[in-house]
Image (cartoon, rainbow, N blue to C red):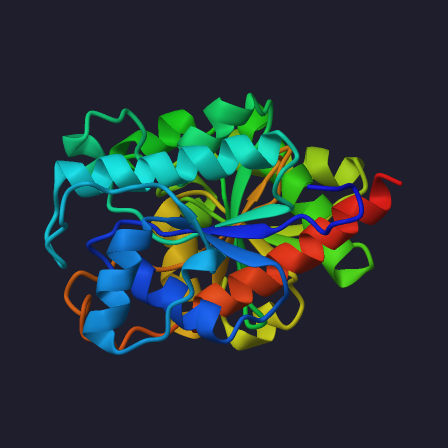
């Protein structure tokens, strides 16, 4: 590759038994940007293309062979192993400077577990692989944006995982990212942890002992962040009008409103990495895999965001 050639953006195939291959084929048939590649199995993608009567250009695929024939819609060790291999190859290429961005299709966490992989999801692997000191998962759409302080842990573990350091990290990363996207200082908000944001300590003291002091520290650093809002009213339309992004304390607190309001349009951006990584904000959808009805809208939005973020990163490094 010459220095004058634009670096490709790569889409991972995702779990080969899910809808990722179908989405990859659909987006290659009508790419939203030039120089877009899919990292996956040419053999498997050709099988999916034939079964769904979709066009297929093997030259648009960076081939990672898959020896086993995968049963569509079924969880398997082989599918988990291959989806991880695709991700690892994409990330290593991006770290080496070969790819401008990585866009990930969905993996299946149980398949990764069957494959003996210790990661509960993409984000945990990305943070370890890139040795990133700070990171955050941000789910974004035109309608609503939510970052997560904790991600794939049991709800019972959330209060112990909330620390001043981690909360400030996510607040700062979210503020920086949304300020760049909005081209002005971002306005953030945080829902409380407990019902009614603790009701003055009646339903828990996390708001008094931790959350309010952290928000005050963030404001003292010049970050505009409201809250803690009672979680059941934090996402009302009148509040969303004044908020560029929510910093949510646990997975479902952010994902429920986001998927309710923008299921097909939401995308996942991993903040704090040395590479650009975006992703669809949905799962493998085994129940509809192989039927040809999966919507590529979220993947298109993820590619568009990756183009924007990689362009911004290139211009800022000059």
* Nearest the eye: 177 or 185: 177
* Nearest the eye: 94 or 219: 94
| Badge count | 0
Residue 210 shown left or right of residue 15 in the figure: right
* Nearest the eye: 244 or 212: 244
Q: Is residue 223 above or below residue 96?
A: below
Q: Residue at x 32, y 49 (%)?
A: 41
Q: Residue at x 24, y 65 (%)?
A: 48
Q: Is residue 45 above or below residue 296?
A: above
Task: Give the quadrant of the N terminus.
Answer: top right
Q: Residue at x 79, y 35 (%)?
A: 221
* Nearest the eye: 146 or 1: 1
Task: Give the quadrant of the C terminus.
Answer: top right
Residue that lies at the very extreme toward the right in this rendered image: 318
Residue 204 shown left or right of residue 209 in the figure: left
**Residue 96 shows in the view:** yes
From the top left corner, tell me how far across and down residue 295 is, in percent. 36, 75
Q: Is residue 119 above or below residue 55?
A: above
From the top left corner, tell me how far across and down residue 311 is, in percent. 75, 53
Q: Residue at x 73, y 58 (%)?
A: 181
Question: Residue 214's quadrant in the figure?
Answer: top right
From the top left corner, tell me how far across and down residue 218 is, in percent. 71, 37
From the top left corner, tell me how far across and down residue 142 is, in percent. 59, 71
**Residue 110 shows in the view:** no
């Amino acid at each position: 590759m010459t220095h004058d050639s634009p670096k490709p953006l790569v889409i991972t195939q995702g779990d080969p038994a899910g809808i990722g291959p179908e989405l990859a084929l659909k987006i290659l048939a009508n790419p939203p940007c030039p120089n877009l590649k899919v990292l996956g199995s040419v053999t498997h993608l050709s099988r999916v293309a034939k079964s769904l009567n979709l066009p297929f250009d093997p030259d648009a695929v960076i081939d990672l062979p898959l020896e086993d024939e995968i049963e569509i819609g079924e969880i398997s060790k082989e599918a988990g192993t291959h989806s991880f291999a695709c991700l690892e190859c994409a990330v290593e290429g991006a770290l080496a400077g070969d790819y401008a961005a990585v866009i990930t299709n969905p993996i299946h966490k149980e398949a990764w577990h069957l494959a003996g992989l210790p990661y509960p999801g993409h984000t945990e692997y990305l943070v370890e692989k890139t040795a990133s000191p700070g990171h955050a998962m941000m789910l974004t759409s035109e309608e609503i944006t939510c970052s997560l302080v904790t991600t794939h842990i049991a709800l019972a573990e959330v209060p112990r995982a909330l620390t001043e350091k981690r909360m400030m990290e996510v607040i700062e990363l979210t503020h920086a990212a949304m300020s760049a996207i909005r081209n002005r200082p971002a306005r953030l908000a945080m829902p409380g942890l407990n019902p009614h944001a603790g009701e003055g300590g009646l339903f828990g003291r996390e708001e008094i002992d931790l959350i309010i002091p952290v928000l005050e520290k963030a404001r003292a650093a010049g970050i505009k962040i409201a809250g803690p809002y009672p979680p059941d009213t934090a996402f009302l339309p009148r509040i969303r009008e004044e908020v560029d992004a929510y910093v949510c304390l646990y997975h479902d607190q952010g994902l429920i409103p986001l998927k309710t309001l923008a299921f097909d349009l939401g995308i996942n951006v991993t903040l704090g990495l040395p590479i650009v990584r975006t992703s669809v904000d949905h799962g493998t959808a085994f129940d509809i895999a192989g039927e040809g009805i999966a919507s590529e809208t979220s993947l298109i939005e993820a590619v568009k965001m990756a183009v924007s973020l990689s362009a911004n990163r290139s211009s800022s490094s000059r």
